Image: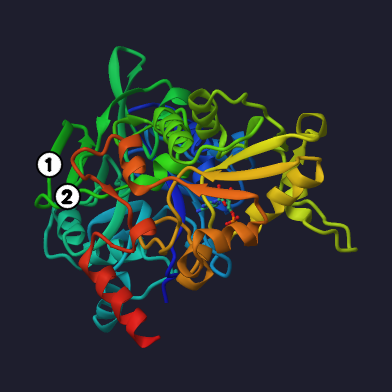
Amino acid sequence: MFDKFHDECGVVAVYGHPEASKLAYLGLYALQHRGQESAGICASDGNQVFTHKSMGHVADIFTSAVLRELPGSLAIGHTRYSTAGDTVLLNAQPFSVACNKGKIAIAHNGNITNAAELRADLERRGAIFQASSDTEVVLHLMAHSSERTLAGALRDALLQLEGAFSLVFLAEDRIIVARDPHGFRPLAVGEMEVSGGRKGYAFASETCAFDLLGAVYLHDVEPGEMIIVGPEGMTRERYAPERNRAHCVFEHVYFARPDSIVFGRAVEESRENLGRLLARECPADADLVVPVPDSGVAAALGYSDESGLPFRQALIRNHYVGRTFIEPSQAIRDFGVKLKLNPVRHLLQGRRVVLVDDSIVRGTTSRKIVRMVRQAGAREVHLRISCPPTMSPCFYGVDTPTRSELIASNHNVDEIRKFVEADSLGYLSIGSLRTAVADVNHEYCYACYTGDYPTELVNIQELMAAKKK
Ligand code: AMP
């Protein structure tokens, strides 16, 4: 069936550029942090839809020879990370099919929470599924729709979905994009100049993709909105009624790149705010502030600014850790973390260190990092986390383990402190998290910190699971 804790992904779409697949490739390259397991591009030259997808990193998959086989002025792309056991190429996106609505392809970021029910119903009606991913459901719902137009069939399909979806969709001569009515995952719209004064359009999970392909960020696809770009130009339509907004706050805490604008807000600004507020709520008597790179850097800058403690990069990250690395056959303790991070001993020797990271999930990596800093000579290690304790799994597209594996779901802060072996541990409060992202209108989802899910089905399922225990 479907993997419960779904894929982290990035999506991109390009319309009206003679080298659409190359631009989609550049967009995916900038979105690589959103998923490193597989990537794919579908392009159309107006008549035919061409697809290439593979396991691995974007830059390794899309050689010039591969991109030459993806001609046309329209393209969509996808990059994906999934939990272990579900890494097969069959689940790599985009998915493309030829059906009664024409040749179509789809790529999806998010998690459709009623996909299992929809799939069971479609299978009863004779649908045959190729993959275990929830995204394929959308194609089958469209094929089964009695609506004759593509946009009509898509609208029909989208209205049956629950949960999180930022979708990009390619037909022979048009791109359609849509976002779920809660707006869980981001999706931005950009515009670019194409030779001859014509306009091209780009859509991407994050605006950092636009910077690389020379597009200007215009606005977001609104929650519950569908945008179509085709030969007749661009049309925007609200396909679903207004719902409570639930933008994923974890995009600002960790997931998105700091050079992106997500939900209309600069990620770097949010992260520095998180650090400043953390310094006010959880001060430490220490000598220096050290980030866990890269995820803790912006918050550590904010913490340093607010506390007046010097900021030092005393952990250095190796950015070139590839998949092909062969570990020595003899077990080396904490090898995984040592591969990625190395301490700068002369900065840490005898010092009292505030170590800033964005989150603790299971606690195992954090413990290794605290040990590393201490072994490098730090006298005290005060761990500061720029969000509240992560207590509940995400069902909307962030890869989190089951509730029982989340250390904060069954341990209090002092127990976690002992586990990670820190001298002190401080988390940011929910109120400060809300302030840091300027959520004055209650438009963000905080379910991973509160267990209060913004959609009914997930709340009911979680309540039932809790009762069974
Ligand atoms: P741990 O101490 O084992 O819980 O690991 C904490 C580290 O995992 C932190 O440095 C986080 O930046 C990182 N992290 C948090 N959420 C995720 C996620 N969804 N995917 C990958 N890494 C994450």
Where is 164 relative to 315, above or below?
below
Q: Nearer the viewer, residue 293 or 227?
A: 293
Q: Amino acid at mark 1?
A: Glu
Is any part of residue 395 visible from this angle?
A: yes
What's the image's color scheme? Answer: rainbow
Query: Residue 74 in the image: x percent, y percent?
Result: 36, 36
Q: Residue at x 49, y 41 (%)?
A: 282
The x, y position of residue 426, in whole percent, is 51, 47
For label 2, the crowd category at 10 Å Cα-Cα, with few meaning under 14, some 14 to 19 and many 20 or more, is: some
* Label pair 1/2, CB-CB below 8 angstroms: yes
**Looking at the rendering, which quadrant does residue 270 occupy?**
top left
**Residue 228 vertical placement versus 83 (above, below):** above
Q: Amino acid at mark 2?
A: Ala
* Res. 151 mark: 2
Foreground of the two, 331 or 15: 331
Residue 375 vs residue 134, the one in the foreground: 375
The answer to whether 199 appears left or right of 292 in the picture is left
Which mark is on residue 270?
none
SS of the residue at dot 2? helix
Residue 161: x and y, percent?
23, 63
- Position of residue 303 measured from the top left corner of the image (x, y, whole percent): 51, 31
- The correct choice, above or below, for 22 with respect to 403 in the image is above
Side (left or right) of 133 relative to 358: left
Image mark for residue 237: 1
Residue in view at x 82 percent, y 59 percent? 333
Identify the residue at horizontal 20%, vertical 48% (top origin): 245
Q: Nearer the viewer, residue 14 or 48?
A: 14
Q: Under 8 Å from ligand 1: the CB of mark 2? A: no
